[in-house]
Image (cartoon, rainbow, N blue to C red):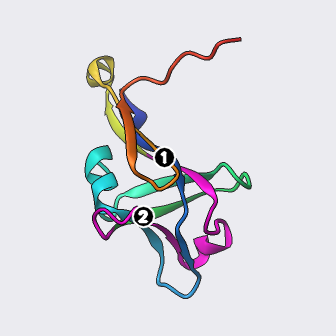
Amino acid sequence: MEVSLLKCKLHRVTVTEAHLDYEGSCAIDEHLMDASGIREYEQIHLWNVTNGERFLTYAIRGKRGSGMISVNGAAAHKARPGDLLIIAAFSWMSEAQADRFEPKLIYVDGKNRIVRTGNAIPAQVA
C-alpha cells in the first residue's frame, strides 16, 4: 500500500505579485524551491492564511534571492500581494518509506528569507 505524505512546505510566505493575465502557475524564488525540494512544474497546494482560500497550481522558478512569490493566472483571484500563504507539496510512498520519511519545512520572515528549517511540526500546547 502507498500513502501520500507532506513532502515539504513553505510556511507563511508573503505574496509579492499577482498576475491575472499570466498563463498560470506560481513563481517561487529559486532559493526557496531548492531549500524545500519543490520541483519546477510540480503540483503545489496553496493555502491562503489571510483569506482562507485553498487552491492547487504548479510551481515555476522565480528569480533566485528575490523573495518572489507570484500567484498567476486564475489563481490570482485567490491571493493578493501581502497575503500570507502556506505552500505545500505531497509525495506518494510505500508505508516502509513513510516510516523513515521526514518532510522539509521552511520558515521565512516577512521578506520571504529563510529563518529556520525543520522536519517536524512542533506539538501544539493547549
Q: Within 10 Å of the Cα at label 2, are there few (<14), some (14-19), or many (20+) other Cα atoms?
A: some
Name which residue lies at 44% across and 54% down. 112
Disc 2 designates what residue? 58
Name which residue lies at 41% across and 57% down. 43
Name which residue lies at 62% across and 62% down. 82
In this orientation, does residue 105 appear? no
Name which residue lies at 27% across and 19% down. 100
In the picture, measured across the screen, residue 69 lies left or right of residue 66, that is right
Picture coordinates of residue 124, whole percent (x, y): 62, 17
Amino acid of disc 1: Asp
Disc 1 designates what residue? 109
Residue depth check, mark 2 versus mark 1: number of the one nearer the observer? 1
Amino acid of disc 2: Tyr
Q: Earlier in the sequence, mark 2 or mark 1?
A: 2
Total count of labels: 2
Name the outermost residue toward the bottom.
21
Q: Which corner quadrant of the image does residue 99 belong to?
A: top left
Residues shaded magenta: 62-88
Of 107 and 109, the residue lying toward us: 109
Of 86 and 67, the residue lying toward us: 67
